[in-house]
Image (tube, rainbow, N blue to C red):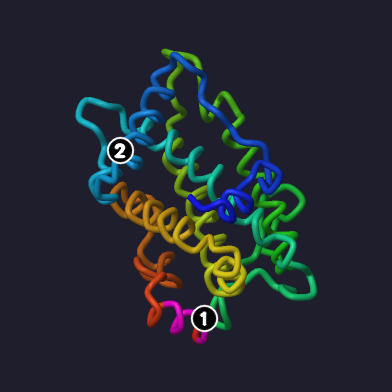
Amino acid sequence: MSIALKQVFNKDKTFRPKRKFEPGTQRFELHKRAQASLNSGVDLKAAVQLPSGEDQNDWVAVHVVDFFNRINLIYGTICEFCTERTCPVMSGGPKYEYRWQDDLKYKKPTALPAPQYMNLLMDWIEVQINNEEIFPTCVGVPFPKNFLQICKKILCRLFRVFVHVYIHHFDRVIVMGAEAHVNTCYKHFYYFVTEMNLIDRKELEPLPGCPACSDCLRRIQTSGC
């Protein structure tokens, strides 16, 4: 990683504090295995496959937390350019608009500026992944029956961050020299959610599986599809 890129992805740029796995736990070991696979240069499609003999919920939990940390960091690098003036609506081009609903303050889908949407999204995800009843950290404590449904919602909403960054702020990512990092993170995310069937194909329409290629990126930035 270049010095410039290290400066971009430093701890001060993180949008939220990282959620970490406790050493010695099964999830920590799965996290280490997943990271080792990525660092070894193994094909991303192979890296996301559920290891033999491992629990699906544990594998999903590890990746949800990891993607939250990394996407959080990516948005943190461009958040100063994502303002209510530049992004008055949370969108992915002219065709896709994302509205916020949390069944608390926002009981109905509500149009919001992108930075406000992002703040609410990251707060909401933090609450989910720090809730021991949803993401238990103690060995032997079962996941709730609706765990995968919750994870699907988290991942679907995190996908929207990629959509917004690619379509509205990728020029800043290029200027920072961070496009390779962002592209790899997106491909890892895309392969994981499609391998594990965690996001409906229709929800993935705003971005192709390879938005980094120039033709795809040009098309999605101009048409939002």
Q: Amino acid at mark 2?
A: Ser
The alpha-carbon separation of the residues under discs 1 and 2 comes to: 32 Å
Q: Nearer the viewer, residue 27 or 96?
A: 27
Magenta: main secondary structure equals helix
Mark 2 lies on residue: 37
Q: Amino acid at mark 1?
A: Gln
Q: Over which residues does the magenta segment extend?
A: 217-222
**Horizontal and vertical percent position of residue 181:** 47, 56
Label 2, secondary structure: give it: helix
> Which residue is farthest left?
52
Tell me the tag on residue 221.
1
The quarter holding residue 98 reads bottom right
- Residue at 59% across, 55% down: 4
**Horizontal and vertical percent position of residue 180:** 44, 60
The quarter holding residue 59 reads top left
Relative to 133, is 67 above or below? Answer: below
Say left or right for 102 vs 3: right
> Which residue is farthest front?
3
- Residue at 53% across, 60% down: 178
Tell me the tag on residue 76.
none
Q: Is residue 87 magenta?
A: no
The quarter holding residue 133 reads top right
Say left or right for 206 vs 98: left
- Residue at 50% across, 50% down: 153
Quadrant of the drawing holding the C terminus:
bottom left
Name the N-terminal-most of marks 1 and 2.
2
- Residue at 41% across, 70% down: 212
